[in-house]
Amino acid sequence: MITFYEYEDSEKKVFSKNLNKFSLIFFNRPIGKNPKDTEVLVIFIRSKINAKILDKMPSLKLIVTRSTGYDHIDLKECVKRNITVCNIPTYGEKTVAEHTFALLLAISRKIIDSNKKKTFRTSHLRGFDLNKKTLGLIGCGNIGQHVAKMAFGFDMDVVVYDIKQDKKLAKDIGFRYVPLEKVLKSDIISIHVPLNNHTKHLVNRKMFKNMNNGVVLINTSRGEIIDTKALLSSLKSKKIAYAGLDVLERSSLNPQLFKLNNVIITPHNAFNSIEALERINNTTIQNILKFYKNKPINTIKWQH
Ligand code: NAD
């Protein structure tokens, strides 16, 4: 039996057609505290998988998350129970990179306030050029490298901090690896690292202090990478001129963030294009079929 959580009607049709030899169950909500036991679990990012949930599914053999990030799954507990975990590693690197620029351009050209349905005056709508600005990337894997490529289309300078360095990639695209302190001095900073024990609150009060006044911060990665309390005070003091956030930490301070004029917030929507969803669905199906052929693909390894 395969149980799907957080599906949409269009996805249900695709899965029902392509996995018709299996028995399928669909729930459009995230997994709750009392999930149905199942052999295969197909989830998205709002279904948190921990030991308590896994204890209620003794038959579980495979978890497929229809996302790139897998910080919502306790991998250590899955290893203990011999449960294979697969993700969708590369469905949306260009899709998320485009959303990164959607947020950045909405900020730089004041697109939200410029909506002509609201105003015909322009004096308060003066933006700024991206041309010749420095873009600093924290993390330059699949998504970050496409953000870098797009930035060169705007004639920006791109500097990168990443724990792994690929000199050929840097040369081919044209960016430079620099220490984190140097990335913090960029005009625009964009975050593209995964959330894990090393990156939670990576961007914290001390880091904000070391950034230039008036920096623009974009986060399409995971909310928990930024310390919300420090972000809020940096936005209020205009140390951070603007933030474009597709992801938020769960925080009681979020209502205050929503009230600020110098923040644009999208609802974890960077992945959400027609083409990306098609790739997610196809890879989800392949992840399940290959698992049953004893040739699992896109498996995630737990790292200590
Ligand atoms: P990736 O694994 O290809 O790249 C991540 C990069 O970060 C790698 O180069 C890695 O070396 C680097 N890195 C890891 N830890 C680091 C650290 N402590 N300091 C500096 N660099 C570090 O991942 P990706 O496909 O580029 O995706 C990045 C993240 O984006 C995902 O983990 C996910 O959380 C998020 N994401 C969000 C959406 C969305 O809809 N908003 C969609 C897809 C992915």
Image: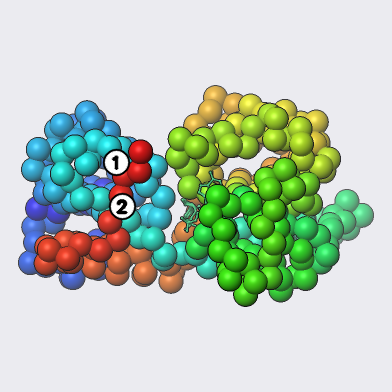
Q: Which residue is mark 1?
A: 75
- The answer, for residue 3, to whether it is visible in the render is no
27 relative position to 123: left or right: left
Count of marks placed on residues: 2
User: Where is residue 287 shown, x and y percent of the image?
Assistant: 24, 63
Residue drawn 72% across the image and 43% down it? 181
- SS of the residue under disc 1: helix
Q: Are the residues at dot 2 and dot 1 in contact (C-beta closer than 8 Å)? A: yes
User: Where is residue 286 shown, x and y percent of the image?
Assistant: 23, 68
Q: Which label number is shown at residue 85?
A: none
Quadrant for residue 127, please give it.
Answer: bottom right
Which of the image's four quarters has the C terminus?
A: top left
Distance CA(mark 2)–CA(mark 1): 8 Å
Pick the front one: 213 or 24:
213
126 relative position to 170: left or right: right
Residue drawn 55% across the image and 50% down it? 163
Nearer-N-terminus badge (2/1): 1
Residue drawn 61% across the image and 58% down it? 100
Pick the front one: 137 or 280:
137
Residue drawn 18% across the image and 46% down it? 83
Where 247 falls versus 22 (above or below)? above
User: Where is residue 27 shown, x and y percent of the image?
Assistant: 23, 47
Q: Which residue is mark 2?
A: 300
Identity of the amino acid at label 2?
Answer: Ile
- SS of the residue under disc 2: loop
Residue occupying the far right of the picture? 123
120 relative position to 72: left or right: right
Identity of the amino acid at label 1?
Answer: Leu
